[in-house]
Amino acid sequence: MPDTPSKDSQSSVFPVREYLDILWRRRWGVILAFVIVVGLGALYTLHQPKIYEAVTAVIINPEPAAITPLDASATEQWFIRDTYYDTQLKVMQSRYVAQRVVDDLGLASNIEFLGLKEVHDPALVAKKMATMDPVSRLLSMLRVEAVIGTRLVNIRVKNQNPDMAAMLADAIAKAYSKQNSEHRLLTLNNTFDFIDKQYKENEVKLQEARDALNAFKENHKILYSNPIEQQKITNQRLDYLNNKRVEIETQRLHAGYVLSELKKIPLKIENVRAFDVVVENASLESSVAECHALEREEQKLLMTYLEKSPQVVSLRAQIDACNASIIKKMENGLKGMEARYLALEKLDNDLNAQIKSVQNEALELDQLRILYEQFESQRQEQERLFELSEKKLNEVSLNRLLDIDNIRILDTAKASTAPVSPNLLINGMITLLAALIAGLLIGFLLELLDISVRTQADIEERARLPFLGAVPKFPKNREYSGKKAYRFVIENPRSPISESVRTLRTTLSFLLKGETSHVLLITSAQPLEGKTMTSINLAVTSALAGQRVVLVEADLRRPRIYNVFKLAPERGMSAVINGESELEDVLIDTGVEGLKLLPCGTIPKNPAELFSTPQFEQLLTQLRSKFDLVVIDSPPVTVVTDALIIAQYVHGVIVIARANKTPLPVLIRTRELLEGVKAPILGTVLNDMSSSSKGYYGGYYYYHKYYTNSYNDE
């Protein structure tokens, strides 16, 4: 046997089932809303006048020789071109063009155009014509649309007269073309005057800029074509002087260093070698060599002659003269080096002065160059403006001569034979869609406004009552309808109804433990919720299970049980309580084994007082001693107080609620009233549940259906 599907699994597999159940419960409201909307849509479509549409195709070429202001930027010119076509579409739909059509065709007095053809009173026609705006009426008929990817524009006009629609479409196209030509000619004339004025002004400004540049060159004695060329030559001179100064500066520093070193050497013969190394003087070197030769010759003579000999004295005199000559050359070399250093220093100063002078000249030339560039820039800008204005002036002159119109009517309008409105297909589809939406909205709105109890969750979570079980709807079968309904559980023991009642009895047997006999009060929140039939079925099922059961008809306001069993007792419970009869005398056999009926008997004027007497409590005690189960059928709690009084003497109270009928506030009020008298509430039974409902009974029905089919297959 497969597992019984749980509530969660059913919700996940069939999430739309709940919405279908809602629509099925509210099907009459959905159908009514659907029919009403369809009917209204049909009436609206039938009463709509037939509208015909005519179309005139117009080509809008790019505006020829578009003349823009001389100082307009590229972005501004692009914006002008980009918005041109959008502007033309707005112009076609403007009041200016519509007014021209009204004036050209005399539409202000056209009765058919104004929609006054059906008015036969001349005075009323004149009154309406005085208050109507023919231009606005024409614009309401007009629709202009651009054909994407082309320069075509369709002018569409709708009217009840197809010939008039075609006439109006063509008239609008002609009026637009005419006003475009007039506007363009006026624009060209104004543009020509404006640019001609600019041309003359730019010509004067250009001559002034040229004169100012020439005067600047003459005043500042610019030798070359411009200061830039002269500045290049000056820069070359400055580079040469800087290089020369670096060279002289290097020599001066070297001379200064040599002079400093020479001054450190004493002018003596023994220092001549060091002096010679610093000066590197060739004549000094030859003198030193000559002195050395004389000294060597002296040494040779001393080997032959005495020191005071004439030969030696004469040679020594030559040596002294040679040494004096060397000292003199050393002095001259030092003086020469000083003179060279001073000469180089003077030359360096002169070069610095020249460089400074050339630098000042370069600075002056740079300032002249800046001023020259300003004058030259003004001259070039004025030349550019002059050439541009000359070009624009030639363009405008050419356009005035050519007189080219960029608007052309491609196709004239034709009178249509088929109306465009009302569109039966679209109206029908919209009506059906609206009807479907309205039906769904009404269905779900009724469901939202419904405050009745429908599921186990409503009872447990919202009404805060224990849930004992659910009883399905009885089949619509004449054999078990009305007074014969209790026989269904007897003759169909395996039906869902019988199973649900047996489940209820089993649940109650677990709740009522510890007593050999139990008294159950079965009541409801309001009338017609099935409490009597539930009482009978519970009593019958318990009796069939082998219990001794008595069914007490305590609903003295509206007794029905004795009619169900087709009994007509003369006395009943009221006679026993009043002491007029004994219990044994009024108990009736129902025909179901183990089940007795205690009818209500004579109905008193005030039944509530009857249940408040000690005799009623004694009656219940007698019944407990004779039966295993006492089932009391009482009136609804919110209608009379009978059930509240009886609830004080019983072991448990069962509240019957009818699915999709019992209001939740009434059920909550019933709980509050029973709790107020401290009644032992066992729970609530949800009656009249549909087999398609989800929740408690949905799972049970699935299981029972599978179980029944499997049994039949075996």
Image (cartoon, rainbow, N blue to C red):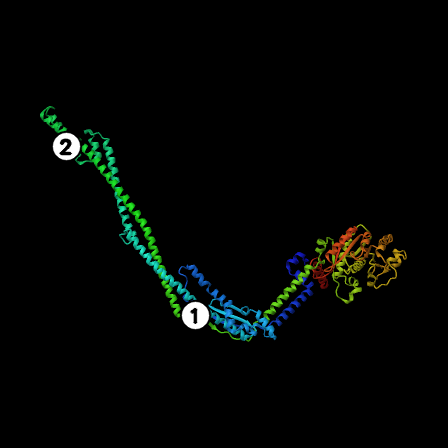
Counting from the top left corner in percent of width and height, residue 690 is at 72, 61
- Contact, mark 2 vs mark 1 (Cβ under 8 Å): no
Q: Secondary structure at mark 1?
A: loop
Helix, strand or loop at mark 2: helix
Image mark count: 2
Residue 249 horizontal/vertical position (percent): 26, 40
| 2 or 1: tag closer to the N-terminus | 2
One can see residue 292 in this view: no
Question: Which is more toward the observer, 603 or 587?
Answer: 603
Q: Single out the residue that lies furthest toward the right.
A: 580
Residue type for callout 2: Glu
Look at the image and tell me whether residue 80 can be seen: yes
**Which residue occupies the foreground of this view, 49 or 501?**
49
Kind of residue at badge 1: Asp
Location of the C terminus (image quadrant) = bottom right
What label sits on residue 228 in the rendered view? none
Crowd rating for badge 1 (residues with CA inside 10 Å; few <14, some 14–19, many 20+): some
| Marks 2 and 1, how far apart at CA | 116 Å
Judging by the rendered image, the residue that carries numbered circle 2 is 290
Relative to 265, 85 lies left or right: right
* Residue 96, position as x, y percentages in the image: 50, 67
Residue 562 spot, x, y in % from top left: 83, 62
The residue beneath circle 1 is 405
Q: Is residue 584 left or right of residue 273?
A: right
Q: Residue at x 25, y 36 (%)?
A: 256
Q: Nearer the viewer, residue 383 or 57?
A: 383
